[in-house]
Image (cartoon, grey):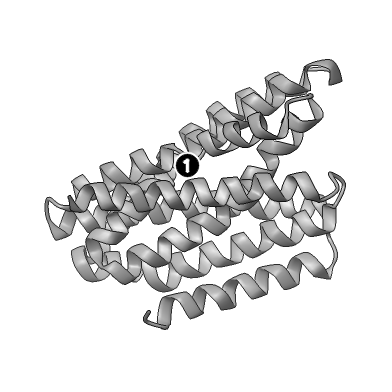
């Protein structure tokens, strides 16, 4: 029953985040580069802060620095492999013309689905460590998924997909978060060392996403102070989440 509850919370964190991003994409202009840059930087600062001040310290506490760092390395390597798969999709997407932009949106949804799985593991293993850590990670993942939902919804809308169908595809891209949470909860139930390994894994995956995707993409969209302010606010919110017990 506990594993099902954790999986449901993982599902909610993925679906709510991507779904909200899809809804935002329907009401804002597609060329709002400043807003997109702010959201991406805020997500980056929030994730980085929670990983450094909450997730990794908990991993080191439960299993020691060695096991936590081993999980971190494995998580980084895994997300790098998934990132290579997504980049291959980007190569395909760049070769598409405007008449096939619908395919671009579908490819984007597939790529984001791949990234959502290790994020789900973070949620599941976080709940095995403590309820507070699990809830913190779930909230952070939901916020992080907002710009991803926007990235899926915009090309689908430009490709002529109806709002309802586009929103459904956006929500489906968040489903792997539930499967990841399910796996994280199962693995985390074995021992504290396994929980520490999973938390380290999640930390490595999330740090890689921040450093290789969110921040570079945000700078491409907008190089002004608004994006930097978003990053700082994200870091402050992450510190609040890490040190204020709910």
Left or right for 188, reference 203: left
Residue 169 or 141: which is nearer the viewer? 169
User: Most extreme residue toward the left, as rendered?
Assistant: 190
Give me the residue at 33% from left, 56% from top.
Answer: 200
The spot of residue 72 in percent (x, y) is: 36, 53
x then y, percent, for residue 172: 51, 34
Q: Residue drawn at (19%, 45%), measured in percent from left and top? A: 186
Q: Is residue 148 above or below residue 39?
A: above
Q: Which residue position holds label 1?
A: 116
Question: In the rendered image, is residue 67 in sight?
Answer: no
Q: Position of residue 36 (x, y in %)?
A: 76, 54
Looking at the image, which residue is at 36% across and 53% down? 9
**x, y (%) of residue 28?**
81, 51
User: Which of the two residues, 32 or 234, is positioned nearer the viewer here?
Assistant: 32
Residue drawn at 56 percent across, 37 percent down: 112
Q: Note whether 80 is above or below 145 in the view shown.
A: above
Q: Nearer the viewer, residue 100 or 211?
A: 100
Instruction: Tell me if I can see residue 121 in this picture.
Output: yes
**For this view, does 114 lie left or right of residue 225?**
left
Q: Is residue 48 left or right of residue 119?
A: right
- Mark 1, secondary structure of its residue: helix
Quadrant where the C terminus sits is bottom left
Q: Is residue 29 above or below residue 246?
A: above
């Amino acid at each position: 029953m506990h594993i099902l509850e954790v999986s449901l919370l993982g599902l909610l964190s993925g679906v709510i985040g991507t779904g909200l991003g899809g809804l935002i994409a329907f009401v804002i202009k597609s060329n709002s580069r400043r807003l997109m840059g702010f959201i991406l930087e805020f997500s980056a600062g929030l994730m980085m802060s929670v990983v450094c001040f909450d997730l990794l310290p908990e991993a080191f506490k439960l299993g020691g620095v060695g096991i936590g760092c081993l999980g971190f390395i494995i998580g980084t390597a895994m997300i790098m492999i998934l990132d290579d798969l997504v980049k291959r999709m980007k190569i395909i997407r760049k070769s598409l013309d405007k008449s096939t932009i619908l395919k671009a949106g579908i490819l984007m949804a597939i790529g984001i689905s791949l990234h959502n799985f290790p994020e789900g593991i973070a949620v599941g293993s976080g709940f095995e460590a403590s309820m507070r850590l699990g809830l913190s990670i779930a909230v952070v993942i939901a916020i992080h998924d907002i710009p991803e939902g926007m990235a899926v919804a915009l090309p689908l809308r430009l490709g002529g997909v109806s709002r309802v169908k586009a929103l459904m595809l956006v929500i489906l891209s968040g489903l792997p978060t539930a499967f990841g949470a399910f796996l994280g909860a199962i693995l985390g139930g074995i021992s504290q060392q396994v929980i520490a390994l999973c938390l380290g894994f999640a930390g490595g995956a999330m740090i890689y996403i921040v450093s290789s995707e969110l921040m570079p993409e945000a700078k491409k969209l907008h190089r002004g102070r608004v994006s930097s302010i978003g990053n700082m606010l994200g870091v402050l919110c992450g510190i609040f989440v890490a040190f204020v017990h709910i």
